[in-house]
Image (cartoon, rainbow, N blue to C red):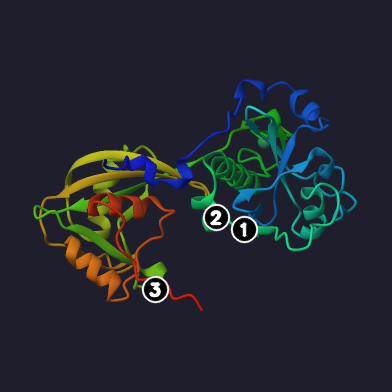
Amino acid sequence: MTEKFTDRLPLSRTGLDRACEQRADAEFLPTLLTDPATRVLWLHGGNAPVRHGALQFAGADSLQYDDAAQEGAEPRLVVYLGRTAQSHVVLAVARPDESVERLGEFIAGGGPVPAGESLQWLGLRDVAATLSPVDSGTFVEAVAIANWHEKHAFCPRCGAKTVVTQSGWVRECTQDQSQHFPRTDPAVIVAITDHEDRILLGANAAWGGTRYSVLAGFVEPGESLEAAVVREIHEEAGVWVTDVTYKGSQPWPFPASLMLGFTAKATSQEVKADGEEILSVKWFSREELARAVEEGGMGIPSSVSIARALIDDWYGGPVPEPKVLEN
Ligand SMILES: [Zn+2]
């Protein structure tokens, strides 16, 4: 049985019911914060506590303790994430100088983390693929909403401070009361093939020119996704494409993207990298790609990314990678 494309997208899995109809109730979140059953996911520098391949949660009492609070400091960000069948889940973002050891004690249930029990603070990209669907979805949601809050402390209309309302899903201006909602930046990412069914991959300057991937770019204001695909590909690879077909999407909160995956057909085989963002573009047959990766040391995107999902989907399964020697 062939794998469904969306099954290849670890960050697109969900499991939490966001219960967004409850967010506007001003008493909803404060009540949860006094409920011993509420589970708190702490983020520290974008990392979350993980043990035995699962996210680790603290009780609501962890919010009472603040070892980094100074006079006049902003309150810590707390956002309602959603509910499972068992409990409500809340995000708390630690101050940068807060002690992860102290937070670890709350996560371990009030005492020090037991010896031999390694609680690790890990990033979403490091761990998402190995988490359960509900943990992965929770972590993605937490990172995405935390990133948005971090960049929207001030009103885009008048520059005054904004404050968090609606259980963490709206910021409101303290001067003109305008409301500001979390934003997501759509980006298209495209597996382009030619009439021989070869795939077009480019070496991005940002990756040092040795890693090849499918081409991608942000959607511009007033542009359809299909038009963005055609424009971006011509810009980066000098080739026009047709038959633009949607495959699936994956949130990519680094900091705020939603990656929309497409396939498209090139109208010619002549390609030319833009030389700025993309250093070189090449056509690969399946054999050529496997050989370049396995023997030639060519890098391809990690299996967490939709880029890799598009490449594997075209390849007909995971592209074999060289075995990493354990030492
Ligand atoms: Zn304002």
Front label number (2 vs 3): 2
Question: How far across and how far down the image is residue 108, in percent?
Answer: 78, 50
Residue 220 in sight here:
no
Q: Can you tell me whether the CB of the residue at mark 3 lies under 8 Å from the nearest atom of ligand 1?
A: no
Going by the numbered disc 2, the residue's amino acid type is Val
Measured in 3D between alpha carbons, the distance from the residue under mark 3 to the one under mark 1, in whole angstroms, is 25 Å
Question: How far across and how far down the image is residue 198, in percent?
Answer: 16, 57
Residue 321 shown left or right of residue 57 in the figure = left
Mark 2, residue position: 127
Mark 1, residue position: 122
Secondary structure at badge 1 equals: strand
Q: Quadrant of the N terminus?
A: top left
Task: Please state which of residues 12 and 262 is positioned toward the viewer in this rendering.
Answer: 12
Measured in 3D between alpha carbons, the distance from the residue under mark 1 to the one under mark 2, in whole angstroms, is 7 Å
Of the numbered discs 1 and 2, the one sitting upstream in the chain is 1
Going by the numbered disc 3, the residue's amino acid type is Gly
The residue carrying pointer 2 sits among few (fewer than 14), some (14 to 19) or many (20 or more) residues within 10 Å by Cα, namely some
Q: Can you tell me whether the CB of the residue at mark 2 lies under 8 Å from the nearest atom of ligand 1?
A: no
Q: Are marks 1 and 2 in contact (CB under 8 Å)?
A: yes
Secondary structure at badge 3 equals: loop
Mark 3, residue position: 208
Q: Going 41% across and 53% down the picture, which residue do you hit?
A: 305
Q: Going 44% across and 76% down the picture, which residue do you hit?
A: 325
